[in-house]
Image (tube, grey):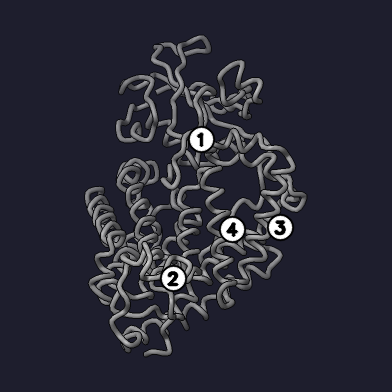
Amino acid sequence: MEWMSADGYLLARELFQRGVGAVYAIAFVTVVQQWRPLLGADGLTPVPAFVARVPWRRSPSLFHWRYDDRFAAVLAWVGLGLSLAVVAGVPQRAGTPATVVVFALLFLLYLSFVNVGQVWYAFGWESILLEAGFLAMLLGGHDSPVPWPALLLVRWLLFRVEFGAGLIKWRGDRCWRELTCLDYHHETQPLPSVFSWWFHHLPAPLHKVEVAANHVTQLLLPFLLFLPQPFAGIAGVAVLATQGWLVVSGNFAWLNLVTMVLATAALPDAWLGGTGGPLGGLTPAATTDGVPAWFAVVVLLAFVVQVVLSRHPVRNLLSRAQRMNASYNPLHLVGTYGAFGSITRTRFELVVEGTLDLDPGEHSDWRTYEFRAKPTDPRRRPPQVAPYHLRLDWLLWFAAMTASPTRQHAWFAGLLERLLSGDPVVRRLLRTDPFDGRAPTAVRVRRERFRFTTPAERQATGAWWHTEAAGEVTGIVRR
């Protein structure tokens, strides 16, 4: 069907599909490395207990059929292998049927993890990745031109990600409208990056420029995505630039990376050097005169379904009570997105300590558990971990905002219990174990206020953070 062909987007399709494959690979690596201590049969929030109380229709997953840690590991490794095959372009070169099958399997596998992942997988970028993977399936392989309805759906997803994030900010914290949010955000974001200290100390006028540019990119330019070139391409380039800035200034897992991948769908091949340019070797010209009939039917059906489902995010965007991240169906398709509608002005951290003293008390030898990226040691520079997602470190940021994390977050109480028992699986989530595998006799949790040091303090002390005690959280908890 020639009328469905979008001319001049073969390279854009290739970059988008391989980019989605790369993000899937990162996501499955996090499953391989973190699933068992967080969600395994003996994890902090075990999957078997979850599937026993939540029916399949609410959380469709292969794990409703069967769950054990070995089965979960096999599915994760299969997902990683398929992801890397997409990055290498193997199913795309094999043709549209193979491309559809591989992306469908990736969607099914990752959906199975997300739908039983509970609080650890309750992030907007999980649904964005699932949507992007589903749409990548509808773009076809090298034996088919790019179907324009599928390309339009990718841009519609990018519009919802960007415009939703812009609206939630404008409607939310007044500092976004006053252009002052970045006076705080580089310091108080969940996991500051290796460059966040310098971004925090940029002049206040430049912070205002950052916020204003964000508003333009997220509230105005997304509408250009639905216009002919060069307007759609201009919007795509703006998204790539602003998301690249966020990659450097913070650790937001793969949120920025997957958004940049979506933006490639707005770039025409001519801007990428054309199929005869340096990137042209990624994909040959389509070998058919039009989209295969069977595939055209699949794409059109998916397009109609997505249009119908879009009524939910559209209503949300128009509502004054806009929700930040929400899925309206258990398949996580056509959801609504947004981030950081409100900004914290003060950073609190939970400092977890343990001791080997047989009679633990205030004067015992308390040693601090170091997490992989969460600030603890004031002299340790924040690391760069994105696009990898450290799920425990992220949730510890949320837990530090609450007055009683052990009561309000069941997983946090479970974490303390596992530290007391010396659980070797949970200890893998830590950066360092101060007791070299031995189980402490007691643990305690303190709350501290963290702020970036000033340039003068940094020069004098070598520390990246200044800390102040902000009270006890648990007292002494014995084994």
Mark 3 to mark 4 CA distance (whole Å): 11 Å
4 or 1: mark nearer the eye:
1
Q: Is residue 96 visible?
A: yes
3 or 1: mark nearer the eye:
1
> Which residue type carries mark 4?
Gly
Q: Secondary structure at mark 1?
A: loop
**Residue 23 rendering spot, x and y as whole percentages:** 39, 55
Judging by the rendered image, the residue that carries numbered circle 2 is 269
Mark 3 to mark 1 CA distance (whole Å): 28 Å
Quadrant in which the N terminus appears: bottom left
Quadrant in which the C terminus appears: top left
Q: Secondary structure at mark 4?
A: loop
Q: Which tag, 1 or 2, sits closer to the chain's start? A: 1
**Residue 194 rendering spot, x and y as whole percentages:** 51, 35
Q: Which tag, 2 or 4, sits closer to the chain's start? A: 2
Label 1, residues with CA under 10 Å away: few <14, some 14-19, many ≥20: some
For the point 43% across and 76% down, the residue is: 8
Mark 2 to mark 3 CA distance (whole Å): 34 Å
Q: Is residue 438 above or below residue 171?
A: above
Q: Which tag, 3 or 1, sits closer to the chain's start? A: 3
